[in-house]
Image: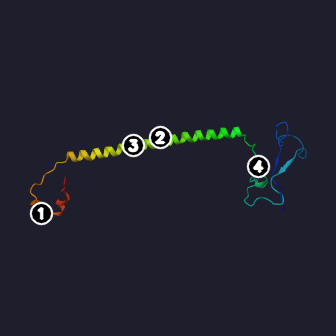
């Protein structure tokens, strides 16, 4: 039950593709994407091409080694970038610390103002303290 495998025509030198050209089919090469012994795909999707070659057989890109000057320039650029990054982080941390200090100062000022604004009643007779209930004791403060 071998069916014809889908084929992709190659581009011809003049820029047009082979299907629009009026040449005979045997005059231009065809690349078979699927192996004809495989048959049609089970999924029913013939446009899924399948693998043409294994990954380890694909071309690997090798780059020319850098010269010593290029390496030094790259290292210096990296160090400069890291220094700028470090300075930016420090700036951010300093701003956060300043904000924390300001909040702490505002909180202390608020508490001090609250104490100043309170209306207090001085207890001169200590015998009154013995008569206080638990609830009243909670509101008693020593200053």
Mark 3 and mark 1 lie on one chain; the one further toward the N terminus is 3
Mark 2 and mark 3 lie on one chain; the one further toward the N terminus is 2
Which label sits in the foreground, 4 or 3? 3
Mark 4 and mark 3 lie on one chain; the one further toward the N terminus is 4
Q: Would you call the spot at circle 4 few (<14 residues within 10 Å), some (14-19), or many (20 or more)?
A: few
Which label sits in the foreground, 1 or 4? 1
Q: Is residue 89 left or right of residue 40?
A: left
User: Which label number is shown at residue 25?
Assistant: none
Q: Is mark 3 on a helix, strand or loop?
A: helix
Q: Distance between the residues labelled 3 and 1?
A: 47 Å
Question: Which sits in the foreground, 134 or 112?
Answer: 112
Quadrant that contains the N terminus: bottom right
User: Which label number is shown at residue 130?
Assistant: 1
Q: Would you call the spot at circle 1 few (<14 residues within 10 Å), some (14-19), or many (20 or more)?
A: few
* For the residues bearing labels 3 and 1, Cβ distance under 8 angstroms: no
Q: Is mark 2 on a helix, strand or loop?
A: helix
Which label sits in the foreground, 4 or 2? 2
Q: What residue is at 15 percent from the left and 63 percent from the top?
A: 133
Mark 4 and mark 2 lie on one chain; the one further toward the N terminus is 4
Q: How far apart are marks 2 and 3 (CA)?
A: 12 Å
Mark 1 and mark 4 lie on one chain; the one further toward the N terminus is 4
Q: Mark 4 points at which residue?
A: 60
Q: Would you call the spot at circle 2 few (<14 residues within 10 Å), some (14-19), or many (20 or more)?
A: few
Q: Name the residue under label 2.
A: 91
Q: Would you call the spot at circle 3 few (<14 residues within 10 Å), some (14-19), or many (20 or more)?
A: few
Mark 2 and mark 1 lie on one chain; the one further toward the N terminus is 2
Q: Mark 3 points at which residue?
A: 99
Q: Distance between the residues labelled 4 and 3?
A: 53 Å
**Does the rendering let one see residue 29?**
yes
Q: Distance between the residues labelled 2 and 1?
A: 58 Å
């Amino acid at each position: 039950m071998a069916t014809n495998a889908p084929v992709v025509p190659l581009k011809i030198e003049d820029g047009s593709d082979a299907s629009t050209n009026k040449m005979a089919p045997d005059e231009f090469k065809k690349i078979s994407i699927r192996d004809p012994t495989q048959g049609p795909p089970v999924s029913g999707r013939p446009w899924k091409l399948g693998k043409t070659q294994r990954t380890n057989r694909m071309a690997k890109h090798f780059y020319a080694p850098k010269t010593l000057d290029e390496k030094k320039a790259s290292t210096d650029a990296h160090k400069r970038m890291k220094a700028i990054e470090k300075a930016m982080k420090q700036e951010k941390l300093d701003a956060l610390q300043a904000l924390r200090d300001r909040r702490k100062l505002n909180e202390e000022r608020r508490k001090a103002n609250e104490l100043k604004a309170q209306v207090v009643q001085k207890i001169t007779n200590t015998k009154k303290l013995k008569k206080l209930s638990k609830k009243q004791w909670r509101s008693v403060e020593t200053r």
